[in-house]
Image (cartoon, rainbow, N blue to C red):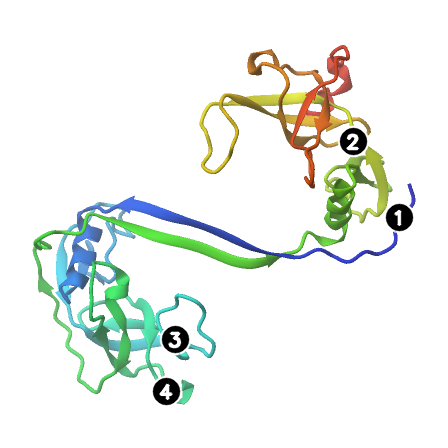
Amino acid sequence: MSPTPAAHILTAPLIVEFPFTRSLGPVQSAFLTGLRERTVLGVKAADGTVLVPPVEYDPVTAEEIRDLVEVADTGTVTTWAWNPAPRRDQPLAEPFAWVLVRLDGADTSLLHVLDAPGPEAVRTGMRVRIRWAGERTGAITDIACFEPYDSEPTTQPTAHSGEFAEAVTGIVAPARLDYTYSPGRAQTAYINALAGRRTVGERCPQCQKVYVPPRGACPTCGVATDEQVEVGPRGTVTTYCIVNIKAKNLDIEVPYVYAHIALDGADLALHGRIGGIPYDQVRMGLRVEPVWTDGSRHPDHYRPTGEPDADYDAYKELL
């Protein structure tokens, strides 16, 4: 097939979000519980260096360290960067500075934010102190921010047992990524073709391999591809796995089979679910065809065609 005319490139907002739950060891537990109690703890390494935030293993010797010390809530800005447009869930709603602060008594710097009226009010070497959050739960957000504070530095940390009532032993850290995804020219054409229940790839002008889904370039030859080739709709199962764990929000009963399927005319296998056959009868070489549902932009699953199995030599290069 000849190249198709230029089409509108698809874009869509995409959010990847999940809660990350982790337990805390004795050092991190003491650090976060201390923040709840308006106490900043560091840990002393083998060479006497005081590390804030504390770590559980010496960065030089890799030995476990638990020698906790308390440092001051005042410190010195070692470097900074101005943030003129805060984003959702950042510590402050108004413009602020990201700062590295070496707290008095510490030898390393803590990353947080500084509440300042503008970048002209921030400088390396300025003195600051912690502004504590009104409600504290045992998280880094118990430090609401840093604020300018005129004081003389102190240097001596004091030993601390790390013991607090009702210690924090675990945290849930939400992870979220908001972005706009664009599949690009090649995959836009692929997606648009799927809407018409067709599958198209692109042929490399040098090695002549047909890639599905297309990538806009040949991963082997490194040259651009733009010649569209319609493949399938039938194909061959090359490899597969049996899924025994039900995914959240996925209305498919387990066990089921997820397979690599080499569509006829393609030189790259794509993914698809196999249906219409008991899971324990799926096999390499099984010939399959797509099953579409009304309104779907992609096949719901693939089912056996009834043809004889493909010979191994016909798909071994696609394993």
Residue 126 position within the rendered picture, expressed as x and y whole percent measured from the top left: 29, 83
Check disc 1 and report its element: helix, strand or loop: loop
At a point 74% along the width and 21% down the height, the residue shown is: 315
**Crowdedness of circle 2 by 10 Å Cα count: few (<14), some, many (20+)?**
many
Q: Distance from label 2 to label 4 (Cα)?
A: 60 Å
Residue 317 visible, this orientation: yes
Q: Residue at x 33, y 77 (%)?
A: 114
Residue identified by numbered label 1:
3
Q: Residues within 10 Å of mark 3 (few under 14, many from 20)?
A: few
Which tag, 1 or 2, sits closer to the chain's start? 1
Using the image, determine if residue 215 lies above or below residue 319.
below
- Cα distance in 3D space between marks 4 and 3: 13 Å
Q: Disc 1 or disc 3, which is closer to the eye?
A: 3
Q: Nearer the viewer, mark 2 or mark 3?
A: 3
User: Element under label 2?
Assistant: loop
Q: Which residue is mark 2?
A: 266
- Give the x, y percent position of residue 215: 73, 45
User: Residue 286's image quarter?
Assistant: top right
Task: Examine the rendered structure and indicate whether residue 154 appears above or below residue 66.
Answer: below
Chain-order first, disc 2 or disc 4: 4
Query: Which is nearer the N-term, disc 1 or disc 3?
Result: 1
Helix, strand or loop under label 4: loop
Query: Residue at label 4?
Result: 117
Task: Give left or right: position of 72 versus 17.
Answer: left
The percent coordinates of residue 309 (x first, y second) are 73, 12
